[in-house]
Structure formats: structure tokens, C-alpha cells
Image: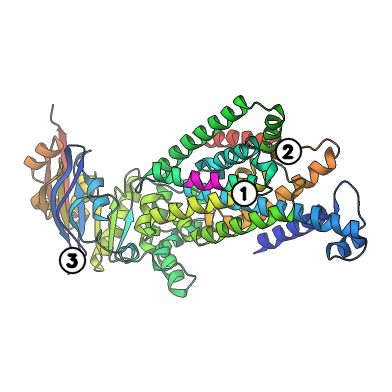
Amino acid sequence: MSLMTLSGLSVHRGASAVLDGIDLTVGPGEFVGLLGPNGAGKTTLLRAAMGLLPARGTASLAGLAPMARARRAAYLPQGREIAWPMPVGAVVALGRIAHGEGAAPRDRAATEAAMAALGLTAIRNRDATSLSGGEQARVLIARALAQETPLLIADEPIAGLDPAAAIRVMALFSDLARQGRGVVAALHDLGLAARHCTRLVVLNRGRIAADGPPETVLTPELMACVFGIRARVTDAPEGPFLQVLGCLDG
Amino acid sequence: MRLMAGLWLLVLPLCAASLLVGAVWLPPGAALTALFGRGDPLLVLVMQELRLPRAILGAAVGAALGLAGAAMQGYLRNPLAEPGLIGTSAMASLGAVLAIQTGLAAALPLALPGAALAGAGLSVVLVLAMAGPRGGALALILAGIAVSALAGALTSLVLNLSPNPFAANEIVFWMMGSLADRSMLHVQIALPVMAAGVLILWPLGRGLRALSLGEDVAASMGISLPRLRLRLALGTAALVGGATAVAGAIGFVGLVVPHLLRRAVGGDPGRLMAASALGGAAMVLAADIAVRLILPERDLKLGVLTALIGAPFFLHLILRLRRQMP
């Protein structure tokens, strides 16, 4: 059973293709790191997969009715927008809108569990807009978790987080995958991606350049060709270890 | 809940005060019996034909503007948005101005509010057509600005070419906004339109709450943004159109009231709609009582007073916003 299937997904802006024939299937238990340089099409892929922008080809989630989709997949966008001065607990509880938004015990339990997972219980009454960027990121991740969907799609969830917070988020996503959920996250930190993801998909100029387990995907050749860096992945006791040696000129 | 109870405790006495304040002071006991048709026939006439419609319209116009303002700010996720932003008030004004200029308003009592409502309806059609089926909030704002500018230019043109200085004078006074000398006929035409607006906007709380986290998140949580936008445009147009049709342009209520109450509802744009309806009713009732008390013999216009209070408040908002920016 797959949580999300894309086949021949293409997005055009004017005459040029931003995404060109993407085929991708994500199943339960997978933590997929979506990698690629700036402008590779990562955000476009995630939004098209969610049906948030018109695309050619098929995306299984995009074809669903809005409410059905909201119960299959939660989406965490790149921008961290919290428009109004709402308490942290209220922002997290917004994730329950997909389930009809009640004050039912199940809704409360989901909200509490999501806050506990992100360490927000102590600041539940604070105004979310007054928090630091890192804390806001955690609040918004908790909102997506409260939606309790089999699949979580996150666009650069650890951008702007300090190292400890970034590691905690990646570990949380790994745990979700171990519990049988699916996670697809666009990432820039190749090291953390190699360490935590079960599978990496590398996007380059709108096409999939590589897809597989971290150790087979992150070859020195691919990192040179796609990212323009000299780097290698070595085995360490804690897992794959990425060494970046420098960037290539031009 | 406490907030709503408090707001009701503000609105109800203001309604009563609005019934009691006027050109002549009436003792509350006699006024109350006259309101129900007993006692001195002259008093009954004053209460039922002058004071009652004025109080009803004050509360209704204020509630409409407050509710529409809260919905518009929630939809655009911008505290500086006001309900007339999508061109409704400018188009409703144009309709009314045309009715005055052509003499229809003088010939038929319902021509002016009718023309204003037609203008409001036309504004929705124009704005939605210009914004396109998939356009988001930005497309709606830009279309609204274009429609407002066009309606403003046409209103100026009518004034410019007006051969009749009396009509021009009447237009200028009408545009200042007032609740003086309104009848039950005005109540009958405005209330159903506004009630429709309330019914259209009421279910939007959930969608507006979801929109607090941006359009993509709201859509991913199952909110249909095109349907939300359609309801918002129709609902605010009904409320603002209805209000403008009977009271002229009453500025700043829809901007200021949601602001004052936002923190009290914990930022929740859904709860803010109901609170702002009551807050708006209180503000317009209070302002309409004030214009009767401050300069009773000079017919101070309601819209002038709300703008005089609202503009400095707006400035205060901008300054506060600037301090929050890095």
C-alpha cells in the first residue's frame, strides 16, 4: 500500500518545465529526504503532490476530495506564517480542522500528544507570534502532527533551526517512520539527511537524478555533479557521516 | 463567553440611550410606552417613526461593518484591511450618487438605497471576474483597488459635471454618512440584505481560522479556498452594501473594531466575527448618540465623527506595527 504516488508529474511555468515527468511512490515506514540545489523544484514537487498547484500527470493525493486528502496527508510549508497573536495550544489545535474540528476527547488527545512530542506543553498559553523562529517552527510541526495523518509532507522543516533543534526534529520524523507513518521532507542538510532518512531522492533541474538508500545515493560523483561540492560519505559508529571538503569552481 | 456578555452589556444600554437622545429629551417612562404605541400620538410618532429606525439602523450598520471588517481582515490576514477594500463601498456610493444626480432619489424613496445595493452587487461581479477563478487574496485586493478607483473616478465625474449645485451639495452630504431622518422603510430594505450577509459569512469561522497559517496550509487542511473567497466577497458586499445604502459611507468602524477586540478573543478570526459585530454595533450607536449631543443644531455627520476618531487610531496602529518590525 502506498501513501502517495506520483506518475509523470510535470509542472510548466511558461515554456520551461519546473518539474519534468516525476515518478515517485512513498510507502509507510519511509522517511524520504528530498534533496536538490536551490531551484531544483523541491517545493514545486511537494505542492503539486498535495494538489496545491495545477500539474500534468497524476498525483494520488491531488485527486482526492479536500477533506479526504486532509486526513491522508499533512503539509508543512516552507514559510512560517502565524497571522494572528494566538496561543500556542490554539495554533496546534488548528490541525484538528481536518477532522471536523471539535472539542472531542480525541481532538484534545491529539493536540496534547503533538505538543508533548515537540516539547511545547509548558508554553501552551504563550502567544505563538512572540516566540523565536525555532520555537515557531516547532509549533507549526506540532500543528501538522495533530492532524494525525499517515503521511507528513514537510518543506524544509529544519531550515533556520539551531543544530540541537534540527537533530530533534529529524529524530522525531525517524520515529514517525518507525511507527509506520510516511514522511517526505525537503532538506538542504545532506549530513542530517544521510543520518536520519531511510531513503533519499535527489532532484536536479526538475528531474529525479537519484533515488535510493542514503549510502548508494550520496556518491562523490553525484554530489559534485548536482550540488557542486567535493564531499564523501564514510561509515561512522553513529551511522553515515558526511564530510564536505569544499566546493567546485564554476 | 465573558467577552460576549460584556459586549451585550455595552450594546443594550446604548440601544436604549439611542432611543432616548434626540432633539427633545423624553422621559424614559413615557418614551417606553410611546414605543409600544401608547400615550401621546406625537410621542408615539417620534418614537416609532424617528428614534426606533435610527436605533435599529445604528446597531445594524455597526454590526454589519464590524462583522465584515473582521471577516475581511481574517481572510486577507492583514490587520489594516477594511471591509470596503474590495470596492463595495465605493460602488455602492456611486450607485447612490447616480440616484441623487438623476433625481430618482427625490422621486422614489427606495431609489437611493436600491441603486446603492445595485452598485454593491455589481462590485462583487466585477471583482470576482477580474480576480479569476484560482486567484488568491492578492488578486482579490488588486481587483478591489481597481474597482474602487474606477468607482471613485466616476463619482468625481458625476460631481464635476453636475449642472445642479443643490444635487452636488446633497451628494457631498450624503457621502459623509448619517443616520438622521431614516425611516422604517430604510430598515426594511437594509435588514434583509444584511441578514443574508450574516448568514453567508457565519460558517466561515473554520476556514478563516485555518487561513491563519497561510493559504497552502488551509487548503491542505481541507478548506476550499475558491468557495471561501466567493462567500467572503458575497457576504461582505451584502453587509457593506446594505450599510452604505442606508447610512452612506461610515469609515473606520470595520477597521478599528476588529483590532480592539482581537487580543480579547485570543487572535481567533472565527470568534472575532461575532465579537466585532457587537463591538461595531456599540461603536456606531455611541457615535450616533455623540453626533446628536455634540452639535445638535448643526447636523454633525456620523461618518465625519467615526473618521475623526478612526484616523488617529489608524495612525496609532501603524506606529505600533512599525515598532514591532525589526
Chain letter of the residue beneath label 3 in the structure image? A
Chain letter of the residue beneath label 2 in the structure image? B
Secondary element under disc 1, as helix, strand or loop, is helix
Q: Label 3 crowding class (10 Å Cα cut-off): few <14, some 14-19, many 20+?
A: few
Disc 3 with disc 1 on a shared chain:
no
Q: Is the Cβ of the residue at disc 2 closer than 8 Å to that at disc 3? A: no
Q: Is residue A85 visible?
A: no
Q: Which mark is residue B305?
A: 2
Q: Which mark is residue A105?
A: none
Instruction: Give the magenta part as a residue range.
Output: B118-124
Between A87 and B285, the one lying in front of the other is B285
Location of residue A99 in the rendering, given as x and y in whole percent from the top left corner: 40, 68
- Write down the residue under mark 3: A2
Dominant SS of magenta comes to: helix
Between A187 and A163, the one lying in front of the other is A187
Q: Nearer the viewer, mark 2 or mark 3?
A: 2
Q: Is residue B119 magenta?
A: yes
Secondary element under disc 2, as helix, strand or loop, is helix
Of callouts 1 and 2, which one flags the residue occurring earlier in the amino acid sequence? 1
